[in-house]
Image: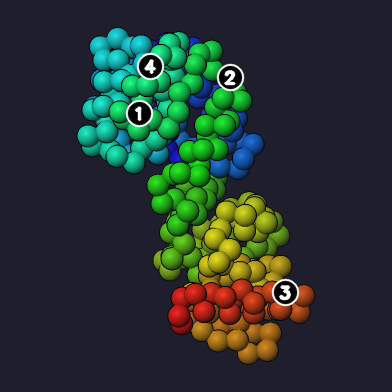
């Protein structure tokens, strides 16, 4: 998730950033957080955010005006106002604010908001975010053919590249759409759209790659494959 914190007090900005990163660490999510000291800088430089934590009382341009201008160019970004004055809540309906947080903001407040934002973020359920020692990728589900693990190294095989990093298939599996991906073996997760043929314990992808189907997972794999075929009409 790409997030912005717009707050004129530096300590408050850093505290909220710390809380967001704490949520990310605990939930396994990937969060990019940009900090702005006022609404003018945010509107000038900030684009493409999933959500913005927006202070109302700021110099140069208050949070409500910032939100109104933001809405003219972005109807989908989630706006969470942060304020000392709860009476501004009514005005928040004009800009379709997700919520209001009253200072002082604690970690539990941020945690609850981040969970809401995660459920409502824009189309990101069709992507897998992965990162290694020297890379970060937002990979569309449609580009992933299969994923494998070998000696604690996970490799995501896409249409154009192979991305390897330390991890487990269990962690990756939890991030994927279970209606589109299946795990035919302890070592593999496969994108069902690329399954061409199954012969015994061999699973053939449309590019000729052959994967193994374990006996313990064979029944569940065929069930998931059948559901996918029936849904997609293939």
Residue 195 visible in rendering: yes
Give the residue number, with chain letter if any, for mark 1: 93
Q: Which of marks 4 and 2 precedes in the sequence? A: 4
Q: Look at the numbered disc 3 and give the secondary structure of its residue.
A: helix
Q: Which of marks 1 and 2 precedes in the sequence? A: 1
Residue 36 visible in rendering: no
Give the residue number, with chain letter if any, for mark 2: 106
Which residue does the image show at 40% across and 20% down from the upper left? Answer: 89
- Distance between mark 2 and mark 3 Cα atoms: 44 Å
Which residue does the image show at 45% across and 35% down from the upper left? Answer: 32
Of discs 2 and 4, which sits in the foreground? 4
- Distance between mark 1 and mark 4 Cα atoms: 10 Å
Note whether 19 is above or below 137 in the view shown: above
Give the residue number, with chain letter if any, for mark 4: 88
Of discs 3 and 4, which sits in the foreground? 4
Using a 10 Å C-alpha cutoff, classify the residue at mark 1 as few (fewer than 14 neighbours), some (14 to 19) or many (20 or more).
few
Q: Position of residue 98 (x, y in %)?
A: 43, 32
Q: Look at the numbered disc 2 and give the secondary structure of its residue.
A: loop
- Distance between mark 2 and mark 4 Cα atoms: 20 Å
Q: Position of residue 149 (x, y in %)?
A: 65, 62
Which residue does the image show at 61% across and 36% down from the upper left? Answer: 25
Q: Position of residue 197 (x, y in %)?
A: 55, 86
Give the residue number, with chain letter if any, for mark 3: 217
Note whether 147 is above or below 207 in the view shown: above
Note whether 58 is above or below 162 in the view shown: above
């Amino acid at each position: 998730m790409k997030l912005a914190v717009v707050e004129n007090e530096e300590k408050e900005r850093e505290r909220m950033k710390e809380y967001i990163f704490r949520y990310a660490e605990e939930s396994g999510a990937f969060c990019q957080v940009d900090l702005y000291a006022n609404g003018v800088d945010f509107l000038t430089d900030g684009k493409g955010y999933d959500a913005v934590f927006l202070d109302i009382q700021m110099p140069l341009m208050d949070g409500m005006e910032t939100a109104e201008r933001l809405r003219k160019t972005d109807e989908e970004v989630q706006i969470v106002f942060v304020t000392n004055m709860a009476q501004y809540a009514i005005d928040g309906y004009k800009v379709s604010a997700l919520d209001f947080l009253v200072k002082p903001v604690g970690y539990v407040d941020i945690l609850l908001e981040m969970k809401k934002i995660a459920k409502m973020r824009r189309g990101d359920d069709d992507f897998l975010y992965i990162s290694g020692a020297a890379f970060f990728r937002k990979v569309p589900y449609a580009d992933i053919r299969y994923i494998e693990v070998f000696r604690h190294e996970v490799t995501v095989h896409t249409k154009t590249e192979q991305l390897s990093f330390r991890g487990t298939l269990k962690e990756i599996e939890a991030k994927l759409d279970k209606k589109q991906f299946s795990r035919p073996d302890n070592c593999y997760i496969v994108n069902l759209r690329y399954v061409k043929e199954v012969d015994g314990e061999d699973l053939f992808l449309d590019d000729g790659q052959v994967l193994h189907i374990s006996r313990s997972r064979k029944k569940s794999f065929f069930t998931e494959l059948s559901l996918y075929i029936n849904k997609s009409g293939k």
